[in-house]
Amino acid sequence: MALTARQTNALRAGVLLSPAYLWLTVAVFLPLSAMLFFSFLSAAPFTTDDWHFTTSNYTAFFSRSLYPDLLGRSLLLSAVVTLCCVIIGYPCAYVLAKQIKGRSREALFLLIILPFWSNSLVRIFSWAIVLRGNGIIDHTIEAILPVDVSINLMFSFPAIVIGLVHSYLPYVILTCYLALQAIDDTLIDAARSLGAPFRTIFVRLILPLSLPGLAAGAVLIFVPVAGSFMEPRILGGRMGTFYGTVIEDQFVAVFNWPLGAALSFILLAVVLVILGAASPVLRHAR
Amino acid sequence: MKTINRRLALGTISLMAMMAGASFASAAEIRVLNWQGYGTDEAFAVEAFEKKTGTTVVHDYFTSEQEMLTKLRTNPGAYDVVLVNSAFTGQAKAEGLITKIDTSDISNFADLAPNLGQNADLVPGGDVYGVAWTWGVTSLTVNKDVVKPAPTSLNVLWDPQYAGKVSIRDDGVEAVQFAALATGQGINDIKDLDAVKAKLKALMPQIKTFWSSENDWNQFFSAGDFVVSTFWSGGAGRSASKGLPVEFIVPEEGAIGWLDSLAIPTASTHQAEARAFINWMIDPEFYVKWAANGAPSSASNKANAALPDTDFNKVTLGDPAVVARVQFMAPLSDDTRKAYLELWQDVKTAQ
């Protein structure tokens, strides 16, 4: 039986796509569905036989100001971390894409991707050593300057931001780099030949054309940071209670999986709403 | 349908276990169910017991209290001695898993510290369902180079002198129980939760960070992040032996204790041998040898007294007056646990 060209294409697409979709089904869709199911139960079925369906886990979110407060705090953390990553990462990506050529670019790239090669827990613990009072920073400054300093950032909000920015910075650099590199240099040359100063070229040409990459990077950072729990716990000390740590408590401290699952889905919903609200900007960028 | 299948499967397994027990266990073999590496399976102890009584000891292990209960439920007759934490004795008894122990032939029973051997959870209504074996405490631990003289009150955690130099474990139940002690309440009978909450709120500005594991604690303590903290007696002993300047204190308000007991399953077919083994486990001769390899504090006053005077457990917990101050954790319902966690989350978020 001879296949038409279209059928062959469809078959090929199916074969090529199926591993990815199979993986997504098994690794993402099924666990998420299980969690969605759990979030409507009164108790996790493997701890007791006495369970029933309920929406009380969702109403629990609104019954105490604790959860909305913490969610707000986590979203604020996300916004701060994303902003820092963009401010640091975008210029870096610009220089890599437009100013540096050849082998040195490869070497610099390697340095940016390097954090990905170490376990995130190791990274956070090494920050704990650096940020601690009477730690490496203090000793270094004291060695250079003849003053007694004590910079103790450990166990504070800035410490959490520093740790998270370090972890997520490569995302924004990589996505911005790809977007910036795709901008045709002749466009910039043309603008320059018509007498546009750099500021105009940047605002009217480079920024709009690279906005999709910037937006993608920002989303990649904003979403996981909103649910982060390990970094706040280790670097935040007593200030380290966030929405993510409360979800973790539900799973590991009180074994209240249904409430933990419900809180997770509320976070997912809130993040989706925020992304939805931002989508006109993203669409415009495209 | 699912439950029926599960029951069928469990029934088959227990039947097989019973047959196995019947065919392999001669009169001279007892089976012990415990955490791995927790005293009963010390090679010297098993050997000495066999030499003394002719009874061989076989071990099986659990990795959580729930697993212990499950093994007792599904393998009746497979075990003769089982380690039961005092917070679980009531449940195991209610399910008929463990039996009343006749202590008349356990000659070392009389040496147990009265509030351990006669602990209300282990000895409900005067019947012994678990022989108190080992215990430990979560209590106050200070840096003795900095905090001088050693405090006697838990309120040192709230002392403005140590603001920013204090730590407790990030655990709702433990935080609430310590605040209960500091406000003069019993840890198992907290009536005034508002006072507990106010006390914890006042503690927050004192705290540098929370600790969550023994390794954490040692790191923070060594780095000087805190000088006053809560800690486990076992952990404090290990830190002290590593040369850290720790002083473990059971303050006048009391401390939070755990108590492990040895119990006999209802279905055990070698109860006399089991009692003999339990007697050996609370024997000073066994305990002194075990303590040299690092053991928690023994429930037997006589065994503790036989330790060398430099032993950490003896120094910190050996005094019967100290033992009397310790309050032992009773079982907690899920609702109470949840309420404590919520209170703790409120306190942490409200700062």
Image (spheres, coloured by chain):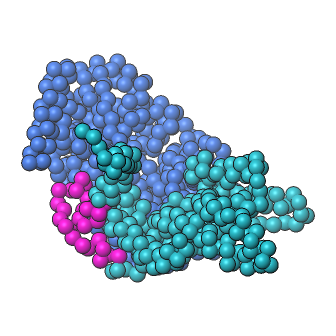
Chain colours: A cyan, B blue
Does residue B324 appear anywhere in the picture? no
Residue B208 on the magenta span: no
Residue shown at the point (57%, 52%) measured from the top left = A120
Percent position (x, y) of residue B96?
Answer: 15, 46
Is residue A178 shown left or right of residue B252? Answer: right
Which of B351/B132 is in front?
Answer: B351
On screen, residue B303 above or below A213: above
On screen, residue B36 above or below A25: above
Question: Residue pushed farthest right?
Answer: A146
Percent position (x, y) of residue B133?
Answer: 36, 42
Residue shown at the point (45%, 53%) measured from the top left = B137
Residue shown at the point (42%, 34%) measured from the top left = B37
Q: Quadrant of residue B55?
A: top left
Instruction: Give the magenta-colored segment's residue range.
Output: A35-61
Does residue A193 appear anywhere in the picture? yes
Give the dominant element type of the magenta stretch: helix, strand or loop. loop
Which of B248/B2 is in front?
Answer: B2
Q: Quadrant of residue A156?
A: bottom right
Is residue B267 shown left or right of residue A125? Answer: left
Q: Please tell me how many numbered marks the rendered image carries.
A: 0
Residue shown at the point (80%, 78%) measured from the top left = A195
Residue A43 on the magenta span: yes
Percent position (x, y) of residue A152?
Answer: 71, 66
Percent position (x, y) of residue A35?
Answer: 31, 60
Is residue B122 shown left or right of residue A272? Answer: left
On screen, residue B81 above or below B150: above
